[in-house]
Image (spheres, rainbow, N blue to C red):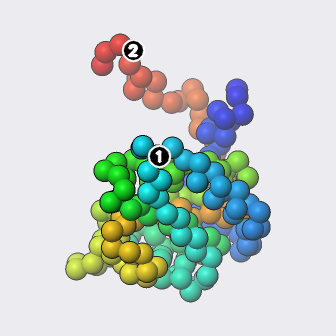
Amino acid sequence: MTTFEALIKNRRSIRKYLDKSIETEKVDAILRTALMSPASKRANGWEFIVVDQRETLVKLAACREVGSKFVADAPLAIVVAYDTEKCDVWYEDASIAAIIIQLAAADLDLGSCWVQVHNRTYNDTTTSEAYVRDLLQIPHNYHVLCMITIGYKDEERKPYDVEKLAYDKIHYNKF
């Protein structure tokens, strides 16, 4: 098994973190990899907002009606936003950057979890995206795709069992 395959096999969504700050060197390494993410026409329209202030993390945790409460207890979240005036495939570019952030975190033995923001709701009148954009003062020409929580794991998840993968999803030459 290659090192990359082992990384993928063992990377699982982690929602419980130790109350421990992440070293600046590790955060910088994760952000460097994000800046190397592939982007259509090298538009590089993504922006990464690093949030490590507890008060702001607690407010970010409220961005969705369901599924984001654990953000309040994460030591760090990276919000992935994209300038939609730079490229029409912003969703794809931002998604690639987000998963690279998660893989970089896993490579540093940190846990992470993707929290979807785009197309989610804060309440009946406000989208999660508008809530996060206003909270973090993100300009309106930016879409907020997601936030990635990162921290030292306070839970263990079993690696993927390669014998149980959905191999029937693989097709050659035609569906």
Q: Name the one closer to the observer, 14 or 109.
A: 109
Q: Position of residue 9 (x, y in %)?
A: 62, 38
Q: Judge depth for marks 2 and 1 and give the one in front.
A: 1
The image shows residue 16 at horizontal and vertical percentages of: 62, 65
Identify whether 132 is placed above or below 174.
below
Q: Residue at x 58, y 29 (%)?
A: 162
| Sequence-earlier tag: 2 or 1 | 1
**Which amino acid does the dot numbered 2 rest on?**
Tyr
Where is residue 104 drawn, in percent x and y? 65, 50
Looking at the image, which residue is at 74% across and 72% down? 20
Name the quadrant containing residue 140.
Answer: bottom left
Q: Which residue is mark 1?
A: 42
Helix, strand, or loop for circle 2?
Answer: loop
- Picture quadrant of residue 153: bottom right
- Identify the residue at horizontal 61%, vertical 39% (top origin): 8
Q: Which residue ends up furthest to the bottom in the rendered image?
A: 55
Image vertical order of residue 38 relative to residue 59, above or below: above
Question: On the rendered image, what quadrant is the N terminus found in?
Answer: top right
**View extreme (left): residue:** 125
- Which is more toward the observer, 108 or 141? 141
| Numbered badge on residue 73 | none
- Between 7 and 166, the one lying in front of the other is 7
Pick whichever, 156 or 107, lies toward us. Answer: 107
Residue bearing the label numbered 2: 172
Q: Secondary structure at mark 1?
A: helix
Mark 1 residue type:
Arg
